[in-house]
Image: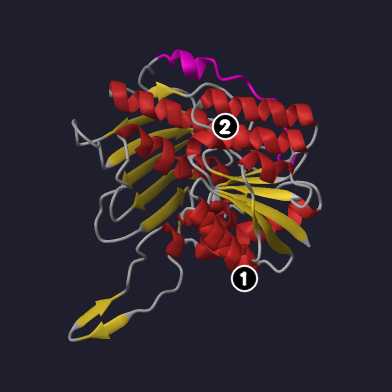
Amino acid sequence: MLDVGVIGLGAMGADHVRALARHVPDARVVAVHDAAPERAEQVARSVGARVAGSAEELITGADVAAVVIASPDDTHAELTLACLAAGKPVLCEKPLGVGVAESAQVVGAEDAAGRRLVTVGFMRRFDPGYLELRTAVLDGLVGDPVLVHCVHRNATPHPQATSEGVVANSMVHELDILPWLTGLPVTAIEVRSPRTTGLRDPQLATLELGGGAVLASVEVFLGARYGYEVRCEVVGTHGAASLRPPGRLELTYDGHSRTPVPADFRGRFAEAYRAELRAWVDAARAGGATGASTEEAHRANVVAAAGVESLRTARRVSVPETGPLLPPDAPYPPPPAPGGHAAPVAPSAELSAAPPLERRGADGR
């Protein structure tokens, strides 16, 4: 049995507490913390946990063996570093840090610790549809991938949403999943929006992976109104594979056929979150981690920073090299294609400062 502490009890954190209690038999929530004490007391009572007076108290508590971080983004790096210092496995919701410098710091701290302890919450890697899509691609069922098309739509934007956050907080899921699907790093990105003032939503990104061996389009539309929808199609030299939504009720009546659309990401990816938590608990009980690594989360941050710069400059931006993605024995990817692309904008100082990361083994280290 893994004794878990959860920091941050908003919609995501509270969902994690419920999922751990109901769907992960090898875990129990023993401590929680939130900036709102009344909310913490309510969640704690629902699972028989104690309320920690601070995040630091929870992390260092003798009764807590592993930690889930679902607090605001600007606390993620600091709290993950505290978990590493305590030697405790941690599942940190994305992003790993606010900006490239923070995520790079966590990568360095985990390397210094000498073992992998951090799982970053890119839950799409655990979604059954995405897993099937990746298997089809890596098994060569569509030949060599050449194009990927992604769609990511929400009903309404968060009241505090920003144009930069469309890339860094929403599109970052695609920035993580594209290398995971293809085995190729993102090497350039261009982000545009039809909106020039206010919240620049929707946004459309064109990405080059592996120096242009694969091209990808990513649409993110936070204000699509009709609901939450995610699509993905990989086009290869011998066929195409498309992500299908989970089985949902189809209603046919009065001359119409209708399939309800989820209201938000929690409905669409409920099973992915549960699978992620189960896999994390199994890994944490063994003293390790699973899923997206700190290195991969840092790379997503590097690409996001390039995307924000592209949105600002309306130019294609090269993504700095941050090390190879796959171990030497990986069956993929195909070699990069030769050049022939438009001249890139030179990376900004923040992007150029991103440290190169050494190759890690097949387990993600």
| Residue 24 visible here | yes
Q: Position of residue 244 (x, y in %)?
A: 44, 64
Q: Which mark is residue 100?
A: none
Residue carrying label 2? 298
Does residue 287 lie above or below 263 as drawn?
Answer: above
Against 193, residue 91 (above or below) is: below
Helix, strand, or loop for circle 1? helix
Helix, strand or loop at disc 2?
A: helix
Q: Could you classify mark 1 by the number of other residues whose Cα lies within 10 Å: few (under 14), some (14-19), or many (20 or more)?
A: few
Reply above or below: 242 against 248: above
Which span is picked out in magenta?
346-365
| Residue at (53% x, 31% y) in the render | 210
> Which quadrant would the N terminus be assigned to in this image?
bottom right
Give the prevailing secondary structure in the magenta stretch.
loop
Q: Position of residue 349 (x, y in %)?
A: 46, 13
Image position, residue 98 (x, y; %): 49, 31
Q: Is the residue 143 above or below the residue 41 in the image?
A: above
Magenta residue check for 318: no
The amino acid beneath tag 1 is: Arg
Distance between mark 1 and mark 2 Cα atoms: 32 Å
Give the residue drawn at x 53%, y 42%. Answer: 94
Closer-to-camera residue (191/113): 113
